[in-house]
Image (cartoon, grey):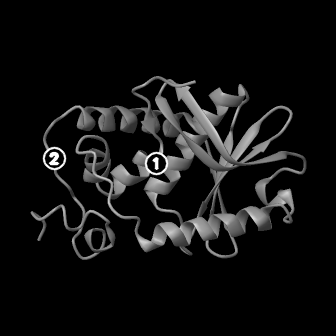
Amino acid sequence: MTSSNSLPIRHLRQFLFCPRIPWLQEVAAMQPLRPIWVTQGQGYHARQEFLSRRRKLSRYSTEDAELLFDQPVGCENPSIHGRIDLVLKGKDRVQIVEFKLGEGKPVPGQILQAAAYAIAAEQTFALPCPEFFVATGKKAKVHHYYLTAERRQEVADKVTQIQQTLADSVLPESSAQSNTQCSSCEYLNTCNDRD
């Protein structure tokens, strides 16, 4: 389904948070201890899967679709792969839903990640994915997005940028803010050049 140099889709969100995270994982092969929010996220996803089986699909602008949870997807152009929280597979289209624990609006990295999943879902299922959703918080508030030509190009451009960063043996610069991003990063002790 995907080539050996296929980029994990999660790296799109991570790269926008801090370009060092994909580099530390892929180039330096550093896998830190799982932060507590990873465990919290797993519990949250399990709860959302349970609730999604009971909720009406109209919240996703559809009435009839097969629900596929933790669905593996991948594609060759761009060369990406990952696992989607929820795929709504209809007869003539697919839609994807990404669940995010935070209560606020999705951040750009989360939206870009979901757009990449939508592109991979199209190629995996050989069906169009014209729209995608990011559901946030305990009540899974639905945020609706379209897979536009601009979003497709943004995903392709960012994948290329990440692949170029991973091809370099030098730790990339980071624009992360030490009082916000850095303080919540599992690699905080690795990046000792930050103020």
Instruction: Report the residue at 33% width, 72% height from top.
Output: 184
Q: Is residue 153 left or right of residue 147?
A: left
Q: Is residue 56 left or right of residue 7?
A: right
Q: Considering depth in this image, is 144 or 89 the residue closer to the camera?
A: 89
Question: Tags 2 and 1 in contact by the CB under 8 Å rule?
Answer: no
Q: Quadrant of the N terminus?
A: top right
112, above or below 154, in the image: below
Instruction: Report the residue at 16% width, 47% height from top.
Output: 171
Q: Secondary structure at mark 2?
A: loop
Q: Residues within 10 Å of mark 2 (few under 14, many from 20)?
A: some
Q: Which residue is mark 2?
A: 171
Residue 72, given in percent of the width and then of the height, sits at: 62, 39
Q: Secondary structure at mark 1?
A: helix
- The amino acid beneath tag 1 is Arg
Residue 128, given in percent of the width and then of the height, sits at: 71, 31
169, above or below 179, in the image: above
Residue 176, given in percent of the width and then of the height, sits at: 25, 62
Q: Which residue is mark 1?
A: 10
Q: Earlier in the sequence, mark 2 or mark 1?
A: 1
Q: Which mark is residue 159?
A: none
Q: Residues within 10 Å of mark 1 (few under 14, many from 20)?
A: many
- The amino acid beneath tag 2 is Leu
